[in-house]
Amino acid sequence: MANPILSLRGVTKRFGGLVAVNAMDFDVAEREVVGLLGPNGSGKSTTLNLVSGALPLTAGNVTLWGSQISGLPAQTITRKGVSRTFQLVRLLPSMNVRENVVAGAVFGHRRRWGREAHDHAEQLLERVGLGGKGDLSVGQLTYIDTKRVELARTLASDPKVLLLDEWLAGLNPTELQIGITLIKSLRDEGRTIILVEHVMDAIRSLCDRCVVMAAGTKIAEGTPTDVLSDKEVIRAYLGDDDA
Amino acid sequence: MNLTATDIRNLILAAGALGVCALLPLGDNGYWLGLGVTVAMFTVLATSWALFSGPTHYISLATAAFFGVGTYVTGLGIDSLPFWVLVGLAGIIGAVLAALVGLATLRLSGVYFVIFTLGLAELVRQVITWVQNNSGQKGLYVLTDLDEAGIYWWLLGLATAVFLAGWLIGRSRLGFALRIIGDDETVAAHSGINTALAKVMLFMVPGAVAAMTGAILAPRYVYIEPSLAFAPILSFQVVIMALLGGASRLWGPLVGVIPFTILLEVISSNFPNQTTLVIGIAFLVIVYLLPKGFVGLLDKAMIRFNGREGA
C-alpha cells in the first residue's frame, strides 16, 4: 500500500499464557473502510483495544501516518486522531444527550468549547438522526439511539480514523438498515474506518477490504467477496466439513 | 466570559449573603461568633472537599492531614513571619503535598484510595510526634493578637475564594473533564482527557484549602499538639457534612454544614460523651436515607413537581 494512514506490524497481545492477538500485520489506507472479521474470541476487539490504547501491546507496533502510537496512553492516541466506540455502549449517565456528545468534542483531536462545541454537538446529533433530542437524559433512549449518541461523541473530535466495535450488533432488522445507511453515509464522507463486525450484510455493503482473524492470527485479507469464499475462513467459521 | 442574567443574579445574591455573614462579629462576640467560626471552617473544608470528591466519587479522608500541616505552619512560623504569609505558605505546602499524594494514589481506585488518605493523616501525625519526642519539645504555643472575629473574617474570605474557584472550575474544561471521569474513566481517556493530570490538579484544591484553614485556625487553639491538629475525626466530619448536603452542587455541602454543626453543638454540650455515637448514627442515616443528600432530595422533589405540571 502506497501511503497507509494506519499500520499494524507484528502486533501481539498475551494475557498470561493465552495469546489473544498473534503478530497481526495490516494496513489501512486513507478513506478506506476495513472490516475486521472472525469468530467469537478470535481477538478482533482486543486488536481494536490495542490500536486505541485501551490495552498495552506485548509486542509489535502501530503507526499513524508513519509515527508510532503504540505505547502511548489512550488519551494521546485520541488526540492524534483515532477515535472509537465500545462493544458494550458506554454513555455518561449523569449527562444529557447533548453533553455526551460535547464530551467528545472538548479534549480530542480537534477541540471545541462553549458555544462552538454546543453547536457542533447539535449538528452531529442531527447527522446521526437524533435532531432535537439533545435535552433527553441517556436513560430515556432506545438501544439504537444510545449507539447513535456514542457514534456522535466519537465523531465530535473530527477523528482521522474511526474504530467501530460491533456498532451494528444487537439491532433489529429495521434498525440494522438504518445503521448500515448511517455508516455508509460516513463512508461516503470519505472517513477512514475500521469496523469489527459479524453482520454479513453490513460487511458486504460497507467494506472495501476485510481482514479475517481466527484464534488471534490473521487468516485472510482481501475484498469481502474473496475472503468470504476463502477456504480457511469457512473452516474457521463453520468447521472442516463445510470447507 | 459570558454571564447570563441568572449568573449575575446568583453572584449578587451570593455577595449579599456574604455581606450579611460578615456583620456577625458586630452583633455578638461570644457564643454565636464561636459557632460562626465553626460553621465557616466546615463550610470551607466541606465545600472544597466536594469540589474534588463530588464529581470523581473518590472519598478522601486526608482533610485532617492537610489541616494539621497548616496548623503547624502557623505554629512554627508565627514568631518570624506575618500571618498572611503563613496562610499563603500553608496553601502552597498543602497543594504540593496533595499533588504528591495524588500522583501516588489517584491511580488507586475505590477503597484503596480511602484507606491511603486516612493513613496519611496518621503518618504525618506520627512523624511529628516522633520529631517532638526526639527534640524534647511537647507542643507549640501560638500566641497572636488575632481574635475570634479576625479568624472569622479570614475564614469568610477563604470561603469566598473557595466558592468563586468552585464556580469557575464548574464552568471550565477541567470541571467538565472531572464530571466525565466521574461517570466513566475509560470514556474520559478515550475522549482525550489526561485523567491522571485532571484528578491531581483538582485534588490540589482541597489540599491547599484545608492547609490554609488549619493555618487560620491555629491561633484559636493557642496550644497545638499532633493529636489535636491531626484528629482523624475532622476528616470524617467533613465527609459526613458534605454528603449530608450533597456533593453534586457547589452549595450542597453548605446545606449540610449548617444543620450538622448546630446538631453537633447541641449534642456535645448536652451529651459530651456520646458525640462520636451521634456522628456514627448520622453517617448511617445519610447513607440509608439520603444517599444523595439534601440536594438529591430537592432534585427528586423538582422532578416530581415538574412531572405533575407536565401531566
Image: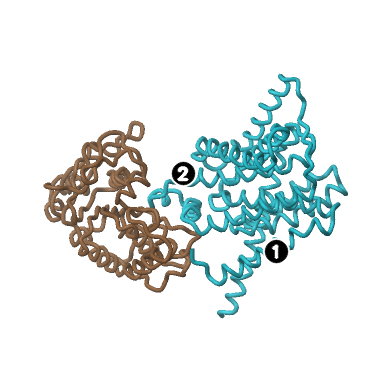
| In the image, residue A155 above or below residue A71 | below
Quarter-of-image position of residue B210: top right
Q: Which residue shows up at 24% across the image and 53% down it?
A: A194
Quarter-of-image position of residue B226: top right
Do the numbered discs 1 and 2 sit on residues whose CB atoms are within 8 Å?
no
Q: Position of residue B271 (x, y in %)?
A: 86, 47
Q: Position of residue A192 (x, y in %)?
A: 22, 55
Q: Position of residue B79 (x, y in %)?
A: 73, 33
> Count of labels shown?
2
Q: Which residue shows up at 73% across the image and 21% down it?
A: B133
Q: Which residue shows up at 41% across the image and 55% down it?
A: A90
Numbered tag placed on residue B17 in the rendering: 1
Chain letter, cyan in picture = B
Task: Please tell me whether mark 2 sits on a helix, a strand or a loop.
Answer: helix
| In the image, residue A59 above or below residue B7 | above
Task: Please tell me whether mark 1 sits on a helix, a strand or a loop.
Answer: helix
| In the image, residue B73 above or below residue B162 | above
Identify residue for label 2: B197
- Amino acid on which the number 1 mark rests in the picture: Ala
